[in-house]
Image (cartoon, coloured by chain):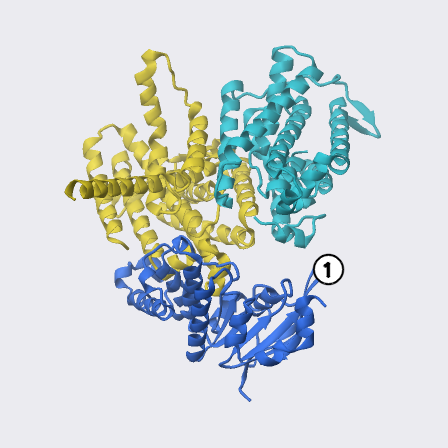
Chain colours: A blue, B cyan, C yellow
Amino acid sequence: MAESILELKNLCKYFGGVVAVDHLNITVEQGKIISIIGPNGAGKTTIFNLITGFVRPSSGKIFYDGKEINGLKPYVIAKMQIARTFQNVQIFPQMTVLENVMVGRHVRSRSGFIFSTLFPPVFRTEEKKIREDAMQFLDIVGISHFAKNTAGSLPLGNQRQLEIARALAVEPKLILLDEPASGLNTRETLNMGKLIEKIKKMKITVVLVEHDMELVMDISDKVNVVNFGRCIASGNPIEIQSDPDVIAAYLGG
Amino acid sequence: MVAMGFNMIYNSTGIINLAQGEFVVLGGLMMVSLTMGADISIPVAFVITVLFVTVVGILMERFTINPVKPPTVMRLIIITVAVSILLKGSAMCFWGKESHYMRHFSGTEPYEIMGATILPQTLWIFGVLIIIVAGFIFFFNFTMTGKSMRACSINRDAARLAGINDRKMVMLSFALSAGIGAIAGIIVTPIIQMDYGRGALLGIKGFGAAVVGGLGNSIGAVAAGLLVGILEALGGGYISSHYMDAFALLILLIVLFIRPSGIFGSREASRLKEF
Amino acid sequence: MGHRDYIGLIIMVVVVALIPRLIENDYYIGILVFTALNCLTCMGLCLLMGYAGQISLGHSAFFGLGAYATGILTVTLGWSPWAAMGAGACLAALVAVVVGVPSLRLKGHYLAMATLGFGAIVHIVFVAAVNLTGGPNGIAGIPHLHLFSFELSTDKSFFYFSWAAVILGLFFALNLIHSRVGRGLRAIHGSQDAAGSLGVNTARYKIQIFILSAVYASVAGSLYANFVNYIDPGPFDVMHSVLLVTMVAVGGMHNIWGALIGAVLLSILPEFLSALSDYFGGVGISYNPDYDMLIYGGILLAIMLFLPGGLFDGFRNLLRLSFNTMDNIKKRVFS
């Protein structure tokens, strides 16, 4: 069995009286595409927020590569090579497309406050490298012709691609994609699927939260169905599609 | 009362109106002109002043808040700051830089109650406060408009879907908070003598009370206002009167740092509200 | 740093070198010194507001801290002005940490109010701590700065010195902006969550930029004390903090050149207005310095409503528009 790169054990999160995540257990195998699906409000984005440190668990543990990571701050998580995208695209609208991805190279570069203040860019070879590397990731995703455009001026589909390019620039081992196909048309969704498979080929583990069932069933190696914060079914796409609990959850049975 | 004003606007729009203090100043100064200068009777002047300041509040909302798209936080804060400067500048031009004295509502002989000397004006202040609070409780809980405003503050989109005109509610909240600010200014001027520059300090302290009481919670605001006032006076008496203002501000800062949801607010509520 | 930035810097050096040749009047030179000090403070504030996206309504407190540090240390303890300036900067940095760490966790309006409260408290302390600060009477007899063996006692010499400081500060700021750190700051402004998820330590960056902006203001304050040789709590109140924000916002807070423009324009505006009123005197419109507040408020409001990117943005759009128009005309004519 392949190594599990991410493990959620008995994870719980309460917001006041609301149980968002309820004793959740999920295992993510390295190098695969794992999907998390479920009705709206089932707690899926909360799971991402828990993993990436935006929210602290009420109880339970999260293991990454064998190490406990619950409660760590987001920037620390990023340094451990976990990257994510956001459900409502969080690009940096005022910066150019290239600059957005350059921020993604933050964990791969070092210049600090003092150094940056005292020495003009001319003397900083690191800057050049960051720029070149960022360009590469734009190429991988396929939007390098937009490099000089202002990020906020891009249509949604390209913005989602940009967010992924930026996340890839972190050179993550694990990437969390939060509804990347949301708001995309059929053609764009197909391209998104191809991009995700490309990411898998780059040996990056993908955890995907999605509503588009075709996309999910098409590319996932394993599907976890979550409802009311609990994992109610887990298996390969074919098993999931015929699982009675799953059908009940979606149809509200 | 200033705190209640902050709460109203915050509840309906999520913004803090930094010009709130100036409404108080305007109320006080206008009242002075009417009663001392034009020699109009107190009740009549009261009504005129409150109406006037309320109109100013509505104008502010219509012209400076409503048209702003995109309503980024930074932009709105600076706009309210700009309005407060304008109001302050106008006050200075009209009323000059001196403090203005207004006669007390009903006489200046202090009463002796339980060993403490209390000016009759103070009783007026409390009386008005109780009336206002009672009025607001009634308004927000028993009238359609009041309930609509509360609906807006809890979930603006849902309220719109229910047919409530949210723009009108916002305008109303500005009007009410301007009015309440004016009333605060009016009843307190006989004791502290109003001048054009008091707005900022009054505003900050009012905001402090609002935060301490839990931003958005009006009962808490009133309680907190009283609490802060007492603490300030105590501090002034025991420590040093120069630092009195600083003391109240320090309380505000400490509360902001340690428990931004205030004493009565809920932690989740303060985080969920968008800043 | 872009080509334009280098060109801008060179132009500044040239202009600064030329001005004292053209303007003989010491009073106006003095105004320009104050302008330089405002520029210095506003640059720091711009880094905080426009790039990191954090608002500070209490920045004149840091300006005052620098001034009073210089005043107290040189007059009461006999320190050298340079040492006092350094101490002032350290003090400002320390205060920035103490105030900043809890404040910068707050967002938006809470932060605005916290900084406002902070500024007000510091001003009250300046007025009330009579034994330390001389209270409302302030401190007199602050010595001049010495550059090597040269005493900076004339308006003209200080003019060169203060503007040199501005250019140096600008150089550092531009370096920072066009660096990895500067990008991180702009990322925080764009989306704090996304920046965090990409490895930017948002809390630490915000504090560091707050400290930097506090140091800029404190140095400006020390220079102020060394220039006028006398300070009182007057210029360090909440109104001044608001004025600083006005300068940055009007000029264009998202660009450091914008902040400079705003600082320069609003610093010389009062003089300009009173000159205008002399001109209009015959027509019956008189200018009262009290109208200043109204005018500042009005300008700020107008800019925020109609031109939120500030004058810098407006100017840039205007240029773009004219180039586009010229292009269109060329196409029409030559096709």
Q: In percent of the image, x 62 and y 30: which residue is there?
A: B175
Of all residues shown, which one is farthest toward the left?
C334
Left or right: residue A78 compared with residue A63: left
The residue to which callout 1 is attached is A17
Residue type beneath disc 1: Gly
Q: If the image is split into quadrants, where does the N terminus of chain B sit?
A: top right
Quarter location, residue C113: top right
Of all residues shown, which one is farthest toward the bottom?
A1
- The image shows residue B174, relative to residue A180, as above or below, that is above
Of all residues shown, which one is farthest toward the right?
B114
Q: Nearer the viewer, residue C173 or B14?
A: B14
Q: In percent of the image, x 64 and y 26: which residue is there?
A: B182
Q: Chain of mark 1?
A: A
Quarter location, residue C1: bottom left
Q: Nearer the viewer, residue B116 or C246?
A: C246
Q: In percent of the image, x 62 and y 24: which residue is there?
A: B27
Left or right: residue A139 compared with residue A58: left
Asked if residue B194 can be seen in this view, the reply is no
Q: Nearer the viewer, residue A118 or B110?
A: A118
Residue B248 x/y as whole percent: 64, 40
